[in-house]
Amino acid sequence: MAFLLRRLGFYLAAFIAAATINFFLPRLMPGDPIQIMFSSTGTELSAENLESLKLTFGFVDGPLWQQYLTYLKSIFTGDLGRSIKYFPLPVTEVLGHALIWTVALMGTATLISFTLGTFLGILAAWRRGSVFDVVVSVGAIFATSVPAVVTSLIVLFFFGFTLNWFPTGYSADPALDPSFSLTYIASVLYHGILPMLTLCTVLTGGFAVTMRNNMINLLGEDYIVMARAKGLSDSRVMIWYAARNALLPTVSSLAIAIGTVLGGSLVTEVVFNYPGLGNILYQAILARDYPVIQGQLLIMTIAMLVANFIVDISYVLLDPRLRRT
Amino acid sequence: MKSLIAGLVRNRKALVGMIILLIIVLIALAAPLLTEYNPAARVGRPHQPPSADHWLGTTRIGQDVFARLIYGARTSLAVGFGAGLLITVLGTALGIIAGYRGGKTDEVISFFTNMVLVVPNLPLLLVLASFIGQASPLVIAVILGFTSWAWGARVTRAETLSVKQKDFVKSAEMMGEPRWRIMTFEIFPNLISIVGINFIGSVIFAIITEATLEFLGLGDPKTVSWGMMLYNAQKASALSVGAWWDILTPCFALALLGIGLSLLNFAVDEIANPRLRTGNSMSRWSALIRSGEGRL
């Protein structure tokens, strides 16, 4: 319990620090951020309108500490201001819409990669040194050391442009209205295949390698030898004795991976023009849409912190030694 | 150190990795000898497919793709090794100091390390780069250096804690050697493998991240680099007009460099830790991947 409380304290401190960086970043940059912000929208604004807009966006005048306190308060009340690019939509609405796409795309890709990677890792470790193991290990090195930009572009080139099998952008046919109709869902799935394929290529290798190594470490343990000596079948030893225990440390990397889901996969979403959180952040950066940038950074930080905390809790649950200290 | 180099020559993965890296370095160094074209100049008609005059075709505005490729290698390598060095120096120094000194120093350094590790890296880099605006390769390398040292610091600290308990450190302390001397000459040489892995991993991370930032349009348009090649090709819709040479060239170059460095990293890990050669050979390597590239 003391351990969890200490971690909770750390995450709170980390959160405040991240929120502070988030607050100061636009203000530390040369020039008046508000001026840059509104000049980039390209519209002429009267001084009076500018003032009222500043107010709407939460740019309070006054000493820095007062602005800072207002900012902190707005975080805890969930009021993140209004987007500049998508004015007058509130930031929460812009992000909320993108969140659905990102969770659907990245979340599914993470789960598929985890399942597939774990499965490949188990088999590779079980047949260590075989052709299968070499193919999986080398494939994992290749897939993870190639930049995501490159993987995305190559997938887009071959399957999108050369073979013309799949659409090259958007999350669904723009001509269709979003609804729960069969045609719309089919279109969403059809558009999701290429980004999904890219993400799975990028993510699977890491999970496979982790699982393989955990398994190999465990295969030398006495209880595995014992299980074999008892004459249990290979598949039973592999799944119920080795894999079950090797899976525990992998769960923490899954939790962290889920924590990064809300960051979206920026590069893949940009290449495939997918309307997720990563793409929204990218567009916001190009448009200098500070409220959206700040909101998205905040969401990502919170997701990471929560994921880390879940890992801590799972360690306490799985490792009784931590409960005493 | 000598055995590390001897081991690298014998290891097949290391050999392939080193050959790839060496070829890229040589091509980058010999760039002016290999092409007559200026990588920034307009030297042909736009979007010409590969031919005898232009081995890898031309870009949308008629630059020679091959010239841009081999001059661009200089930028990628310079940013990669420069930022990699900065990341490694910072991470190693902080890790050894935290691990060896312990107490309050350790608490402060560890707190910052853990904090940097939980704040999402790439988005922060993006925001920083966009605020600076048209970041040159040098600026990108410096930003990377100062934001990406945390993983190295954490791993180095953990290793330092175990080396610190060894007898030779105790005896050096008994003899009254100053602390900085113990950290530099007793502890550091025993961490050389972890430092090497950290260094190569950081180089890979820096090369990938530089290319990504530039691809996203946050780089300086005047730079000749693989990331800018990707950005320009994408902006010129090279894929939809069928100019595959324009966009696939930097793609394959980046993939090749990434694979070469990863093989090398993998091999250093195996050689430095003989125990790993048989079994757990990729554990730290995969941790490295998760720490950096995974977030892209």
Image: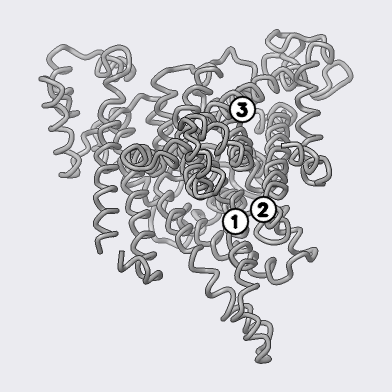
Can you tell which quarter of the image residue A24 is in? Answer: top left
Residue placed at 41% from the left, 44% from the top? A263
Q: Which residue is mark 2?
A: A140
Question: In the figure, A16 relative to A116: above or below?
Answer: above
Q: Are discs 2 and 1 less than 8 Å apart at CB?
A: yes
Amino acid residing under circle 3: Gly
How many numbered badges does the structure rendering display? 3
Can you tell which quarter of the image residue A271 is in? Answer: top right
Disc 1 secondary structure class: helix
Q: Choose between A167 and A70: the one closer to the eye.
A: A70
Q: Are discs 3 and 1 less than 8 Å apart at CB?
A: no
Can you tell which quarter of the image residue A33 is in? Answer: top left
Amino acid residing under circle 2: Ala
Label 2: chain?
A
Disc 2 secondary structure class: helix
Q: Choose between A26 and A187: the one closer to the eye.
A: A26
Using a 10 Å C-alpha cutoff, classify the residue at mark 3 as few (fewer than 14 neighbours), some (14 to 19) or many (20 or more): many
Q: CA distance from mark 2 to mark 3?
A: 22 Å
Residue placed at 37% from the left, 71% from the top? A320
Q: Are discs 2 and 3 less than 8 Å apart at CB?
A: no
Q: CA distance from mark 2 to mark 1?
A: 8 Å
Q: Which residue is mark 3?
A: B80
Q: Identify the image quadrant of the N terminus of chain B.
A: top right
What is the number of the mark on residue A204? 1
